[in-house]
Amino acid sequence: MSSVSAVNTLLSGTATTTPAINISTILAADTGATTPGIDVTSAVAAAIYADRAPERIWQADQTTLSSQTTALTAIQTATSAVATDMQALNTLTGPLAARTVTSSSSDVIATAATGTVAGLHTVVVNSLAATGAWYSDLETSPTAALPNSSITITAAAGPSLTIPTGTGTGAVNSLNALATAINADTSLGVNASVVSDSTGSRLAIISNSSGAKADFSVSGSYTSWTAPELATGGTLGANSITLNIGGTPATITTTAGETYAQLATAINNAPNNITTTTDNTTTPPTTTTTPHANVTATAGIDPVTGDATLTIVSNTSSQFSINEPSTTASSTTGFGFTQAVTGADASATVDGVPIDSASNTITGAIPGVTLTLLGTTSGVPADLTVASDATQVSTAINQFVTDYNTAIGLVNAQYNFNSTTETEGVLASDPTVSSLQSALEQALNYTVTPAAGTTTTVSSLNDLGITTNADGTLSVDSTTLDNALTNNPSDVQNFFEGASLNGFANSLSNSLNTFTDPANGAFTVDLSSMSASSANLTSQINNFESGYIASQQTSLTAMYSAAEIALQQLPQEMAQINAELGNSPSGNSNQ
């Protein structure tokens, strides 16, 4: 066989004795393609994947750093919680200084400020403070027309206000308008409102504060005043009314069974409604009494109903005032005011010292203690006990134990060996975590040495019922802790705070500060280093991608694309060669 025939046979694959060689298949296998020819995309991807081997190492390092950062951040948070617990137990205003007050009487309750000196006190409440209050006579509605008169409100502190009612100039003509006028004057220290029910409406006036100095009085002034009619045959109840005529008050007392006619006579004969003259030139001196004619009281009969009536009319242009809580047997008469409550101070003794208070809340009688008086003690002292708030202290100590267990649990987990992966935690080789573990464990060995000549019942955590478990966590015996808090609260406080905030809490707080300090603490430094390392790896990956992988991808794509084109053109070129050589598809060795 000639050399030309041999080449022709190799390339055509038609020889009967020589196996065909498919270059396309060989190239496909060489480049990793799944079909004959070259899959440029797959070929380039396979080559680039191999080139990116360093990147995968860097990315694995980043994953490790991320896991370490997450784990260390969790430990940092847990450790900071323990440090916060210690700060709360190392201050004069924290849970150890909280106070509670128990009282032997429901009539006196009290609270104590943080740091208040513990002790026993006695309180006797003689009377409670009261808030002054008045209410008007009943009107049919809040907008019903008021009679021509005026009311005067006088505060115990001095200010007064007179408001005319009715139809005169500047007068108010309803309870609603009267309430508005009163509330517009803030100097009186009172508040007025209209109270309505099924029987009608009244004006209620209440002091803004309790106590005698906040009390006030209300009086009405009239030029004409008419009492409610008294049913036929009806009589008055035992009571009294006070008339103020010309600035001089006079009280007229009625007895049960009197009539309006008898009351009219009594009013007309009242001392402030007559003039008395004494003639000293006679022997004996003579006294003459004549009507002063300030007012005239007239009793009569309603011609329509037949009921008794009473009218008082000023005989001058001056107004008169009348204050009558209940002249009739059935109700208050006229548009007057009734004093519901007299403003008064509370009266008490605290540890034997008399106390007068405008309010039922008393501060200052016992330093740091606020008393709330709810009732009189009927002379029986209320015993108040100011003591350490065991509940708050117990809560704070148990919170410390919980947070400590969280922190030591996270730390210890880094040294637990996983038999499946044959690895420890991601921070097993981190010096910060190792140092923290030692600091937490050593802190539990703290003991108090009493000063010379003194003793203590709480010298270690064990005396509080706090013990260490095999895994390094803590447990609390609540019975032991409660006994210490109840029977020896000062020893508990001294254990944590020391003589000058230098006890267990300060010791552990200082130890943890080397880790938790936000500026130079071990956590800050370690996390910053991890962040810098991760950022450096990111920079390496980015540089490798832009400086090598990008150009390599371009070069490989061009090379494999050219090879694929050449491969696709190869059959045509082989056919041309065969044609030029004059070879037939069957091959002719005699040529």
Image (tube, rainbow, N blue to C red):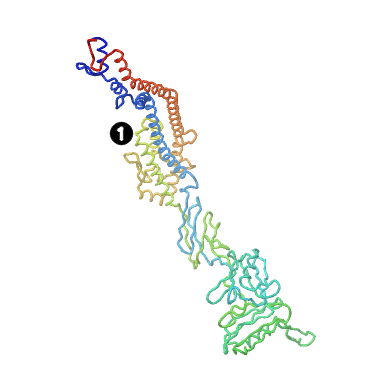
- The outermost residue toward the right is 281
In the rendered image, which quarter is residue 42 located in? top left
Can residue 156 be seen here? The reply is yes
**Residue 6 appears left or right of 40:** left
What is the tally of numbered marks visible in this picture? 1
Q: Where is residue 520 in the image (x, y as percent from the top left)?
A: 48, 33
* Nearer to the camera, 560 or 32: 560
Q: In which quarter of the image is the C terminus?
A: top left
Classify 96 as above or below 365: above
Can residue 504 be seen here? The reply is no
* Nearer to the camera, 487 or 313: 313
- The outermost residue toward the left is 17
Q: In which quarter of the image is the N terminus?
A: top left
**Residue 414 appears left or right of 228:** left
**Residue 257 appears left or right of 428:** right
In the rendered image, which quarter is residue 171 located in? bottom right
Q: Where is residue 192 in the image (x, y as percent from the top left)?
A: 60, 68
Classify 280 as above or below 130: below
In the rendered image, which quarter is residue 526 located in? top left
Classify 485 as above or below 365: above
Q: Position of residue 246 (x, y in %)?
A: 71, 77
Q: Label 1, on which residue?
A: 417
**Residue 19 appears left or right of 153:** left
Callout 1 crowding tier (Cα within 10 Å): few <14, some 14–19, many ≥20 = few
Q: Kindly state the secondary structure of the residue where label 1 is placed.
A: loop
* Nearer to the camera, 96 or 333: 333
Q: Disc 1 residue type?
A: Phe
* Nearer to the camera, 52 or 357: 52
Q: Where is residue 85 in the image (x, y as percent from the top left)?
A: 44, 43
